[in-house]
Amino acid sequence: MIEKIKREGMLVAFTLLGFLIIAFIVVTLGNMLATQVVQDLGGLIKAAQDPVVLDSIWLSMYTAFLATLVAFIFGVPLAYILARKEFLGKSLIESIVDVPVVVPHTAAGIALYTVFMHHGGLIGAPLSSLNIVCEDAVLGIVFAMLFVSAPFLINSARDGFKSVDPRLENVARSLGASQWHTFCKISFPLAFRHILTGSILSWARAISEFGAVIFLVSWPRIAPLLMYERFESYGLSTSRPIAVLLIFICLTIFIFLRLASMRWQRHDSD
Amino acid sequence: MIAIKGVSKNWRDFSLKNIDLEVRKGEYFVILGPTAAGKTLLLELMAGFYKPDHGEIWVNDKNVTRMPPEKMGIGFVYQDYSLFPHLTVKENIEFGLKLKKMPKEDVEKKLKEVMKMLDISHLSHRYPRTLSGGEQQRVAIARGIVIEPSIMLLDEPLSALDARTQIRLREELRRVHRGAKLTTIHVTHDQTEAMALADRIGVMMDGEIVQTGTPEEVFHSPIDKVVAEFVGVENIIEGIVESSEEGVTTIRINDHIIEAISSAEAGSRVRICLRPESVTIAPSKTTSSARNTFSGAITQLVPLGATYRVEIDCGFPLVALITKTSVEDLGLRVGKKVCASFKASSVHVF
């Protein structure tokens, strides 16, 4: 054993360090879930029957879905261009895509509020003159979520398209396929696993968003906001069941989609 | 027929310079050149994947320079075959047919024909990653020819295969070409492949086509030293023409005289080149029709599988390619004195 540690000292150290970071994640979540279930199962069941809680979780989930859908529609074409074409200012565009990830989300929330508020907001004011309201509305939640989550989908889709050999597209063209047909039949299916992973990440990121949303929309309440409000007013025992419930639902969906995307893997070229 | 007229292109690390090339209908044309000569890029330009910076490409008397690749009707097989990994063999092959909006029965019929021709019917439902290199190659060729292209472009189609499969598929390619009378352009760096398949060869160096001709012309009369070295003419020797009469030229190399068939003028400095397989070795001087015989000692013997590369110092270095059996029968070894001879007609002067 000591011999082995001497021989592979570095790998042993790395394993130990890696184990600690994994333990940190597992212990934090596991402790909360276990404490809730063991000490206060009744609270959890009560929360699961509370229409206010269920509404806010449902709101978070479907607004996150809408944000991911919008990111998909606008992001996938952009990702393809970024993967395939070289052009002036490409690295600038790529940096802009990454900006929402590095901007503090409360700061993003202020920025979103400034743009989408109905009194004087650059986009919010003209929209409200058309009777489209972002402030304290579902639309506002979707915009805020879109801002913080789109980079995950775009970057993942770009990596996906990059992993598709351009020669496959060339051959498809030589066989008589138009650019559009080649995209639909070759590039998209082969990049699909990456795009799906990106969509899951984007969706998960959108559900978890708090800071970017609350300045623009404090009602209807998304799940993280409800959790925070309950914590402020009633403390841990009221807010923790919502957290456990949200994590449980998200993890279930996440694992399901993960398994679905693994089935796709066998067709990948890389 | 495809004609490349003054085509130039800069792309990443490659550049093609003013390429002129004409490939006739039904011809098997091989573009032969070392790695990074720009051969693949030239093929991709012909297929319309990229557009040239200058010049024009004509297919069957039609200017197709700006045409999108899907309208060109040109088949393409890449070195790595580029089969669609998410489609089965059958789906790969019918990809192009389905786009032609053919009746379903015709699609099935054509599929059957081409799969039978290339002996891949049994692979129909397999995915590309489960196939061997040779099988993938057949599928790629089937996928290309089934749409009945006017021209077939093959980019190093055999170089990723083991030697035995290479030889088998080389014969297959020739058979398919003859059967379909399909104009084919085949890119390779392998001289044997070129010699075995080509009706004509275009030698490509540093983005230029430097010589075009039949395999005999290219291998026996390379246009310059670079081509000669590339096509495997190992004996390139400098000398001065002493006299030239009735097509027979005598060339002085140090203290030796070589006879060659050429029209070089007396007094001019020339290079002679001679393929190593044109040199024969005998233990002592014999009478033969060969005009050039030199004695010398073997300086090196390099085994190359079935043959040996034999270097002899005849007052000038001479390389011969001798079969292993001959080497054993003659008892050749380093230091042994031998007589090397070659015909005047196998010497090329430039």
Image (spheres, rainbow, N blue to C red):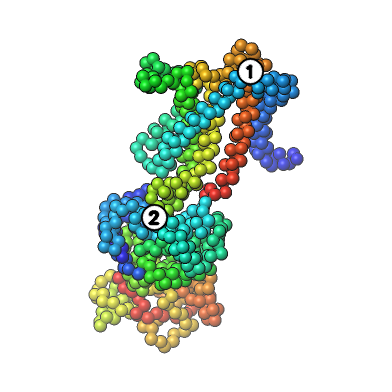
- Give me the disc on residue A197: none
Pinpoint the chain carrying mark 2. A
How crowded is the residue under tag 2: few (<14 C-alpha within 10 Å), some, or many (20+)?
many
Instruction: Between residue B318 and residue A134, name the one nearer to us.
Output: A134
Of callouts 1 and 2, the N-terminal one: 2
Q: Which residue is mark 1?
A: A239
The amino acid on which the numbered mark 1 sits, given as a three-letter code, is Ser
Percent x, y of residue B33: 38, 62
- Which corner quadrant holds the C terminus of chain B? bottom left
Residue A256 to residue B188: above or below? above
Q: Which residue is mark 2?
A: A176
Instruction: Name the residue at 44% across, 69% down.
Output: B176
Percent x, y of residue B196: 43, 71
Instruction: Between residue B349 and residue B129, name the one nearer to us.
Output: B129
* Secondary structure found at label 2: loop
Residue A34 to residue B317: above or below? above
